[in-house]
């Protein structure tokens, strides 16, 4: 996707320096566009934990590159142990996005297939790039597969703008390119279908207000930022034609873990007959998990993210206190939307019902005997 007319992905190897990974440091968007160098697995872990990078797909791609850096710096005589420890460090950074563990395991399996140190490093580099390229390609296909749904609504509305509500940032900043929830939106916009996006601000980190709004603006997609509590009111008044959100982990039965507040939007959509779609590349399915509400690990972050808010003042990025200084705050990062509230899953292989039969219809190789 483009930033001021120049194409960027969210993660890449530095030109002429294969020992440095570069990322867009999302903490400063939309006010400053900062590219950060990461040179060690420890720096990668900190970047994931402190949300320089964030979003399920990008967390997975970053972990893939983190494992490559680990291979690069692993001591010759203790290579395997160093790699396993690095995977544990990376996996401990954020618990909810399943892409993180998936990327670490893919790297460990791939590296184990070859013998010499040089081969292991080359394999890790290749795998990091493959995870990254796959994410971009899968998201592109998610866009193609979601396009028909938006097109059908546009035809029903005789070409009047299709109003789409989204939550958090499941855009290209949360992946490597295209995004998941935004991919069908970009595809529709690029195909000349008029769309308008209601962007939930998404407290406490404001990924919608800061990141989704910026992304859509860079691509020229009409959008309006709304406070998190507005969606239900808009749906009651026919102002939302469909919701499309992303996910950090979706069970094989179709329960959807996503940014905190998604469940409430799904309830409101259900009450108002508004279709509620979830867009995801298959790297976000947890094939082992069946009951999302009971089993999904939900990240709890520091209360300060709720108590303080960041913004621009006199050209400087500043953080201010919002609450009484000694009021305690709780900060759950994610919630689970039960499958029964989800109209459909938009994947790289097509759109399916949010249930085990629908999902396995697209991914038959995940059937268990
Ligand atoms: O905590 P974050 O910003 O990493 O949140 C993850 C997300 O971006 C959202 O939950 C998103 O909707 C799905 S992940 C692409």
Image (cartoon, rainbow, N blue to C red):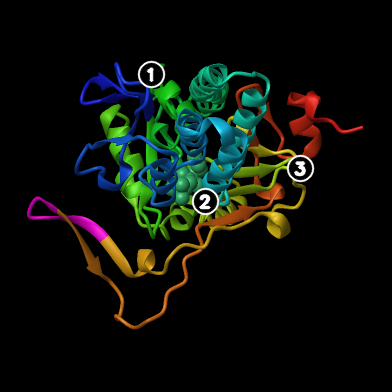
Q: Is residue 303 left or right of residue 337?
A: left
Residue 291's spot in the image, x, y percent? Answer: 75, 52
Are there few (<14), some (14-19), or many (20+) residues within 10 Å of tag 2? many
Q: CA distance from mark 3 to mark 2?
A: 19 Å
**Magenta-span inclusion, residue 139:** no
Residue under label 1: 190
Magenta residue span: 310-316
Distance of label 1 from label 3 (alpha carbons): 37 Å
- In the current view of this chain or complex, which residue is farthest to the bottom? 326
Q: Position of residue 346 (x, y in %)?
A: 60, 30
Q: Which residue is mark 2?
A: 94
Quadrant where the C terminus sits is top right
Q: Earlier in the sequence, mark 1 or mark 3?
A: 1
Ligand 1 is within 8 Å of the C-beta of the residue at disc 2: yes
- Drawn side of residue 215 relative to residue 172, left or right: left
Say which of 115 and 167 sits in front: 115
């Amino acid at each position: 996707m483009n930033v001021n007319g120049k194409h960027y992905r969210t993660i890449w190897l530095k030109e002429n320096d294969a020992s440095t990974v570069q990322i867009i440091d999302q903490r400063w968007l939309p006010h400053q566009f900062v590219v950060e160098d990461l040179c060690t697995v420890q720096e990668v872990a900190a970047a994931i934990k402190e949300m320089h990078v964030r979003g399920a797909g990008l967390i997975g791609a970053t972990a893939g590159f983190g494992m490559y850096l680990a291979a690069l710096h692993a001591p010759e005589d203790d290579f395997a142990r160093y790699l396993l420890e690095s995977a544990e460090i990376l996996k401990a950074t954020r618990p909810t996005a399943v892409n993180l563990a998936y990327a670490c395991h893919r790297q460990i399996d791939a590296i184990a297939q070859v013998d010499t140190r040089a081969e292991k490093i080359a394999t890790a580099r290749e795998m990091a790039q493959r995870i990254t390229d796959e994410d971009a390609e899968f998201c592109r296909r998610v866009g193609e597969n979601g396009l028909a749904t938006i097109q059908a609504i546009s035809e029903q509305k005789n070409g009047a703008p299709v109003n789409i509500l989204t939550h958090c940032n499941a855009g290209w900043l949360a992946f490597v390119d295209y995004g998941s929830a935004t991919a069908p939106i970009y595809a529709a916009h690029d195909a000349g279908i008029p769309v308008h996006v209601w962007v939930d601000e998404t407290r406490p980190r404001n990924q919608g207000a800061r990141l989704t709004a910026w992304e859509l603006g860079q691509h020229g997609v009409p959008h309006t930022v709304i406070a998190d509590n507005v969606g239900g009111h808009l749906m009651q008044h026919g102002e939302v034609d469909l919701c499309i959100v992303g996910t950090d982990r979706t069970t094989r039965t179709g329960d959807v873990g996503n940014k905190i507040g998604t469940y409430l939007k799904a309830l409101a959509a259900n009450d108002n007959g508004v279709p509620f779609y979830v867009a995801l590349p298959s790297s976000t399915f947890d094939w082992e998990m069946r009951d999302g509400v009971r089993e999904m690990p939900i990240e709890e972050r520091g209360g300060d993210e709720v108590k303080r808010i960041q913004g621009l003042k006199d050209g400087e990025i500043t953080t201010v206190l919002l609450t009484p200084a000694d009021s305690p705050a709780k900060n759950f990062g994610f919630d689970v939307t039960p499958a029964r509230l989800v109209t459909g899953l938009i994947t790289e292989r097509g759109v399916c019902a949010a249930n085990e039969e629908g999902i396995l219809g697209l991914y038959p190789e995940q059937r268990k005997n």
